[in-house]
């Protein structure tokens, strides 16, 4: 499996979304972290919604990235909104720190700026649940930033949108449907080590993803740190894992130039 070009690595903040219908969005907080193979993305409206229906407007995902020429495909392996479809963009680097993403049908334009402190080393670790139900998660690092993504404890039925599920379940059950964690923050340069600055989970911002501060090399983290990572770890804990085998066949589906 080929890795993505070095020009993609780091954390990119979206500063503009413009659709062909004339809709513009400059306020949603969107961050895309890219490592050599894996990506993760978090999208939180501003102001941040707190109730169940409002939180369905959040978005984010994680998975494998493949680049061929100017085309980039993000294979979403876990997704806040299941069945959100294929994600392929035409990428134009304006300079080393700004890239424009356009839909293949020109239905949208997204402008991305790289965060300066995200340049440098990237690391990534894929995780799987030690027990059932089958779940996946990942932790990505780029420069001084981290992004942790973990699938919800209770899988959603395929073909049914999150919004639809939330509209028919008892409010006491809605939190289980919204328990997909995306937590983004700084490793050392924040107000505290591994401080979460933005999350899909209410009240998570300001907390530490891990404490006490572990070593910088993910390969040296002890098993007990991985086992309990996140707000909703599996009952049997997380295990370090290779990517699911079917990812590599999915990667071959990238539209040819």
Image (spheres, grey):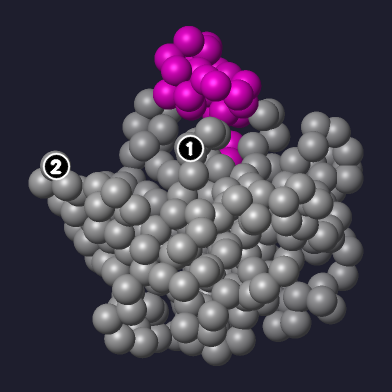
* Residue that carries the numbered disc 1 in the rendered image: 84
Residue in the image at 55% along x and 89% along y: 120
SS at circle 1: loop
The front one of 209 and 252 is 252
Q: In this view, does 234 lie to the left or right of 139?
A: right
Does 167 lie within the magenta span? Answer: yes
Q: Position of residue 138 (x, y in %)?
A: 68, 58
Residue in the image at 65% along x and 55% along y: 252
Q: Where is residue 135 in the image (x, y as percent from the top left)?
A: 75, 41
Quarter of the image where the N terminus is located: bottom right
Where are the magenta residues, as a range? 156-183
The front one of 101 and 257 is 257
**Structural crowding at the residue carrying mark 1, measured as other residues with C-alpha within 10 Å and reported as few (<14), some (14–19) or many (≥20):** few
Q: Is residue 93 left or right of residue 38?
A: left
* Residue that carries the numbered disc 2 in the rendered image: 21
Residue in the image at 40% along x and 35% along y: 55
Does 71 lie within the magenta span? Answer: no
- Please tell me in which quadrant of the rendered image residue 21 appears: top left
Q: Position of residue 243 (x, y in %)?
A: 77, 57
Whichever of callouts 1 and 2 sits on the residue coming sooner in the sequence is 2
């Amino acid at each position: 499996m080929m890795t993505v070009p070095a020009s993609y690595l780091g954390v990119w903040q979206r500063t503009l979304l413009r659709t062909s219908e004339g809709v513009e969005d400059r306020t949603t907080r969107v961050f895309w972290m890219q490592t050599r193979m894996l990506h993760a993305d978090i999208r939180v409206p501003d102001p941040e919604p707190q109730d169940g229906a409002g939180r369905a407007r959040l978005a984010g995902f994680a998975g494998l990235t493949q680049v061929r020429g100017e085309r980039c495909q993000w294979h979403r392996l876990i997704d806040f909104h299941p069945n959100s479809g294929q994600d392929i963009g035409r990428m134009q680097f304006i300079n080393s720190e700004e890239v424009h993403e356009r839909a293949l049908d020109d239905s949208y334009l997204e402008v991305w700026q790289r965060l300066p402190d995200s340049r440098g080393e990237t690391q990534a670790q894929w995780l799987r649940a030690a027990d059932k139900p089958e779940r996946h998660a990942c932790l990505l690092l780029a420069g001084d930033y981290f992004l942790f993504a973990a699938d919800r404890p209770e899988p959603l039925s395929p073909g049914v949108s999150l919004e639809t599920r939330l509209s028919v379940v008892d409010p006491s059950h809605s939190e289980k449907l919204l328990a997909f964690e995306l937590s983004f923050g700084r490793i050392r340069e924040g107000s505290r080590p591994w401080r979460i600055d933005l999350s899909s989970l209410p009240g998570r911002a300001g907390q530490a993803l891990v404490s006490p501060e572990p070593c910088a090399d993910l390969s040296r983290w002890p098993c007990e740190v991985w086992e309990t990572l996140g707000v909703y770890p599996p009952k049997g804990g997380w295990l370090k894992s290779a990517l699911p085998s079917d990812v590599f066949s999915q990667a071959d589906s990238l539209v040819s130039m």
